[in-house]
Amino acid sequence: MPDLLIELFSEEIPARMQGAARDALKKLITDGLVEAGLTYAGAGAFSTPRRLVLAVEGLTAESRPVREERKGPNTSAPAAAIEGFLRSTGLTLEQLEKRADKKGEVYFAVMEKPGRRAPEIVAEVLEGAIRNFPWPKAMRWGSGSLRWVRPLHSILCILQDEAGAQVVPLTVEGISSGNTTEGHRFMGIGRFTVTSFDDYAAKLRKAKVMLDPAEREAHIWQGAQNLAFAAGLEVVEDKGLLTEIAGLVEWPVPLLGRIPEAFLALPPEVLQTSMKEHQKFFSARNPKTGRIEGFLTVANIETPDAGATILKGNLKVLSARLSDARFFWDNDLRVAKAGMADWAEGLKSVTFHNKLGSQADRIARIAALAREIAPLVGADPDQAAKAAEVAKLDLRSAMVGEFPELQGVMGRYYAQAAGLPEAVADAARDHWRPKGEGDSVPSEPVSVAVALADKLDTLTGFWAIDEKPTGSKDPFALRRAALGVIRLVLGNEVRAELFHELAPAFFRHTHRNEISNEIANMRVDPEAYFAKHLPPLSPDQSEAMFVRQADQAEIRAVREKHYPRELDLLAFFHDRLKVYLRDQGIRHDVIDACLAMPGNDDLTLLVKRATALSDVLKTEDGANLIQGFKRANNILTAEEKKDGVEYSFGADPKFAEGPEEAALFAALDLAEAKIAPAMASEDFPAAMAAMAALRGPVDAFFTAVQVNSDNAVVRRNRLNLLHRIRAICGGVADLSRIEG
């Protein structure tokens, strides 16, 4: 069985495209070979800046012959039907067979395709892959029509077996395949012939090319660590930068340089970002002081002076870049020490969104909301409001203008320079978080208050102007913002009814042109706030609006009438929470069972309930109790519908017949006595355990007792008893929503 080696040699491929290109080459070729009838034992893809490589082991020498029979129309069918069948098979009428069938005589097409040799199939598949390669961006050059990421120079394609290596002949836009390649652009040995993958890899190494990107990464990292250690420094880890650099060099040579003393006073984040973004340098830090004092660059060539000339040139460019950074830093510090008033004024002319006002308008809303949220997270309201007012001012700084990824980081430095409290400065840095799935969640109260206010203002704002995510489109990253709120609430165990935070936030968006800044920023009681500005509610409705224990149907009716956007956004949070909890191992039906309960806008309470229910359902008692509950619920629902009455009162143990029925009464009394105080104290595990303990008595009851007794009094009593099962279990979660 032959082995296949393919190399597509070109000008430099951008590092960011190489990983996807390796995967695409492997998939296009292997899928094409399999579809054509070949099999293979294994395949591996590699890349360097100037080549994409695929090695396929154990390829079959030819495809198997294929015999296909296809049933056609009846021999008496209209001519048009028969002609259509002939066109689909590519046969003539004389080549069709006539066979007896249930419906009479029908035509059959018998098509035999002989096996094809591997070189023929490989050439066909490779040409198709080259012409249809999915580059994010491609170019044409010369007079040809081929599009490739950079000009393609040569195609190496060989099949090697016991008899030796043979070139697979193909030509693409004047480029004919061969068995030669070349090594490093400067340290290579010219073009050379290869006979197998092992021969190819060995000769490339002699020509100063490390083929495997993983090997290049390991070589760079180990070399950088060794150089840093010898200089008393340590390398700041950056896996993304490591992968990028490995895609820029074919023969990596790490080199260590020192940052001039004049720049060491710059914040370490500025040094690190400037060197990474502008020059692809690793940062080297002094482990004793934490200062960034050195840089590690990776050359693509060995030099007689051990890289001294390269380092000298890099240091010259680095000094120019860091001089710019120091200029930005010095100017920004002057503005910060003066109170950042210039930046605040500048944000008035920066539009956040044409329907949501300026950045200054947004900051005012966030500050007001942060003040309201502060008591819920244990933060000082004045500090939370102040932090919100200054948190985004660094957007006007020269440093963040140059390096947008430093927003927040620089805000902390500038807040400190302005003499603001550490909690306010930390909030300027942390209120952006969490930015993504792997980002940590802030825990300091002021930071949490501002981070929540920021994300809630964004969500309510875009909901207010009906710019919600649709399908896969989410241009304003609202799903990420909602997940950020969820992680902030759960990570800090924030106890808050989210609905109450949404209504004032929506009001600030919808009335931003009608109310003054004083009203928008004042601290208001929610009920008084709604009473003054929102549709009037009767006293009973108002009480139901704000008392969690009130009748949930009434609360829902009031909210649906007056606050549809708030409910819609709350549903969006619930959808995001389902995704988040599913990743934590909690089933969607468990979440639905808990969402149906009162207090579902208190996300911390909701997750505590869902976690406890999920845990109890993993036990045998919990899983079996669900079946008993559903049986009780189904019988009760059917009988209530048939009788036209609700059996919800009057179950009396004196009408119990037999020990199993009496035992169920006793078990329900015991469970109710345990569940009620457990739910009141939000001890959901205890409540779930008490509920699960009903499994045995419920099973025994249904085994021994016929609910629909001939005695009408006993029947009614037993149906009321089933209602007690439903009510007691339903007080913990809506078990009717549990699947299975």
Image (spheres, rainbow, N blue to C red):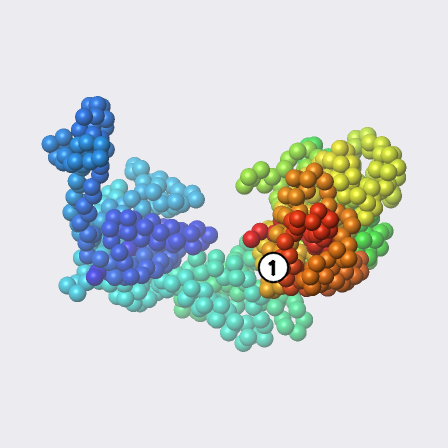
Would residue 55 be found to the left or right of residue 699 on screen?
A: left
* Location of residue 494 (image quadrant): bottom right
Q: Residue at x 46, y 52 (%)?
A: 16
Q: From where the camera sits, is residue 563 visible?
A: no
Would residue 194 be found to the left or right of residue 449 on screen?
A: left
Would residue 248 be found to the left or right of residue 721 on screen?
A: left
Q: Residue at x 60, y 39 (%)?
A: 469
Seen from the viewer's position, the closer of residues 570 and 592 is: 592
Q: From where the camera sits, is residue 635 visible?
A: yes
Name which residue type carries label 1: Thr
Q: Looking at the image, is 236 positioned above or below residue 330?
A: below
Seen from the viewer's position, the closer of residues 37 and 650 is: 650
Q: Which quadrant is home to the N terminus?
A: bottom left
Q: Within 10 angstroms of label 1, few (less than 14), some, or many (20 or more) residues? A: few
* Location of residue 229 (image quadrant): bottom right
Where is residue 290 drawn, in percent x and y? 66, 69
Q: Looking at the image, is 464 positioned above or below residue 587?
A: above
Q: Which residue is mark 1?
A: 703
Q: Residue at x 35, y 51 (%)?
A: 27
Q: Looking at the image, is 475 positioned above or below residue 665?
A: above
Where is residue 409 drawn, in percent x and y? 69, 55
Q: Residue at x 84, y 51 (%)?
A: 381
